[in-house]
Image: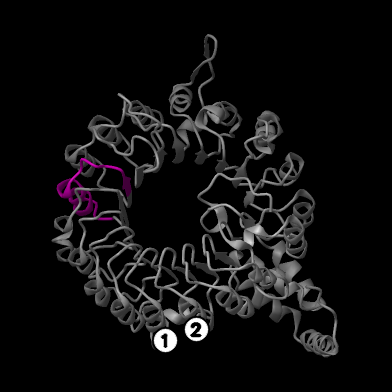
Amino acid sequence: MVHKKSSGDTATTSASVAGDSLLEKIPESILNEILLLLEPETLTTLCSLACVSRTLQSTVNKALSSFSSVDLSAFSLDSQTFDGVITSFGKLKKITLDCLRLSDSSIRSFLGPNIEELVLVLTLEFSVSIDKSAVFDLIRQGSLLSCQRLESLRIKIRGGDFNDYGFLLLGIYHELPQTIKVLKLQPASALETIVFLKTFIYANSLVPLAPMTFGQTLTHISLVIDIISDTLLHTIAHCLPQLVELDLKDRPTSERSDDLSNLGIQSLVKCKHLTSLSLMRSWQCIASWFKRTTDIGMFLLSEGCNRLESVRFGGFSKVSDAGFASILNSCSNLNKFEIKNAFLLTDLAFQDFSKFPRSLVEVKLVSCNSVTSEAVSELATCTSFEVLDLFGCRSVADSCLHNISRLTLLTTLNLGCADVTDVGMAVLGKGNTPISCLSLRGCRRVSDEGIISLLGSEGKIRKTLSSLDLGHMQGVTDNAITTIADACVGLTELTIRNCYHVTDASVMALAFKGRVRRLDLYNCTSLSGKSFQFLKKPLFRGLQWIGIGRTRLNRIGDDGFDEICGERKWLTICKDGCEVGCHDGWQFHEF
């Protein structure tokens, strides 16, 4: 559709000029004070303001120059756009980038002695050879060494295999400056990590290397690796004496004899400064469980590491209530507690929860099928909760929602696949919880009536909600989506994947409201090609990501997509089945 300038556009232009003259009367010092109150995360808002008038453009440019940190990972910028944007900032100390379309020269352009934290996210197409990657060029050419104040480095590569990129550690470990404290790599090889932590590597022959200088300063390490073993934990505990945070996630492709056991857990007792521990096994792998770790390992850990403030365990199928309760009750400073895929975890682990003072702000019990509403009601006695994740807890029902609705600090609630109903939604809607992120994915007993009750009440949620997940809900139709578009004034992210009764009317309602920036329509089979016209400007203002996999929108030819992407330079159109933002997938997207 071609938009032509009409007489109405002339009136708008005149109003804009008048508005510009009014803005020019406001002292620049006042505008600067207003913009300084904004957080760095409001970069998109600032860029939008710069388009309003020349006065605001000048003020915004000054505000950007004062930023010490910037996160551009939400935008897949090409080198030309990035080179133009980066000049607006002053001396950056922290920068987060999606390197998909960036050249190595663009990345090197901002590296220097001021950089303290660098986060690089790279998506590799399977056909791209390694020597063409900007990140690998950075490592080979020693650019990291120019960051003499670098304290934090995070590199995430989407795509490929552990065997393909395990050798990446060789370059990274020996290019790191002595100031490094935080290191996060995905993917990494467990064997290479062990070898380098011991300062030796086996190539064709045994070659001794100089001792690593960063081992004594490294306090935070996060790795996505092929296997978490006893040997790995022994090595980390011995070689990194100052470790404060340990975050390991593995994806083993077969059963291993050196899998994590109680002995590996016990070795962590040597880490006297450890306050954050995460040991997660991906449920997508062949060997999905830590079968050699039992309650005994948890008893030893709770006794030797009782200063823990954050605990995340996933895949511990042999640990029961006694083991998890020992962690929960022994670590008095615990504020984050997450358990995933624990078959033996039941309500008994939380039976004395309300009898002791707690500082918990985040609890996640994911796919713990034996946890019921009784345990959740007990947990909800802790009024400091900000995050409560009960995804996959199928025994959780409406009876606990009254207690949850009274949590005045709760901002994130995940009830995915729980046994809640429309009645429970009405209770939640009348509550005083300032929920900004809500997931009802897979709640089959919630229908349009429940969504309307949730958002039609006088509670806080309709005013605070910014992210809503209604995926896999067969009872959701256009009536619910229209209510959402009208009621949720702050909604920026909406997932309605696999909602088969959602039609073009829903897309139109969302398009004309123009608030949603990320929209997941995957497998909404009732959509027709007519919805494509709603993706064009000026509708869907600020749209950054849309998933259209397995819909009729996917049948639109390349010319149609070229037209949309020509209008919206930073829009990602995902034709695959990725979750919002493609953060879960390894696909390379053409658009």
Q: Where residue 589 appears, x then y in whole percent?
A: 64, 49
Say which residue label 2 marks.
Answer: 487
Rendered residue at 50%/50% (across/down): 584
Q: Where residue 92 appears, x then y in whole percent?
A: 67, 53
What is the three-letter code of the residue carrying label 1?
Gly
Q: Please tell me whether residue 38 is drawn above or below residue 578 in the rendered image.
A: below
- Residues 487 and 180: in front is 487
C-beta proximity under 8 Å, tags 2 and 1:
yes
Horizontal relation, residue 278 to residue 401: left or right: right
On whether residue 318 falls in the magenta region, the answer is yes
Query: Nearer the N terminus, badge 2 or badge 1?
Result: 1
Horizontal relation, residue 547 to residue 457: left or right: right
Say which residue label 1 marks.
Answer: 456
Q: Where residue 405 appears, x then y in whole percent?
A: 31, 77
- Residues 283 and 301: in front is 283
- Residues 139 and 281: in front is 281
Q: Please tell me whether residue 183 is drawn above or below residue 264 in the rendered image.
A: below
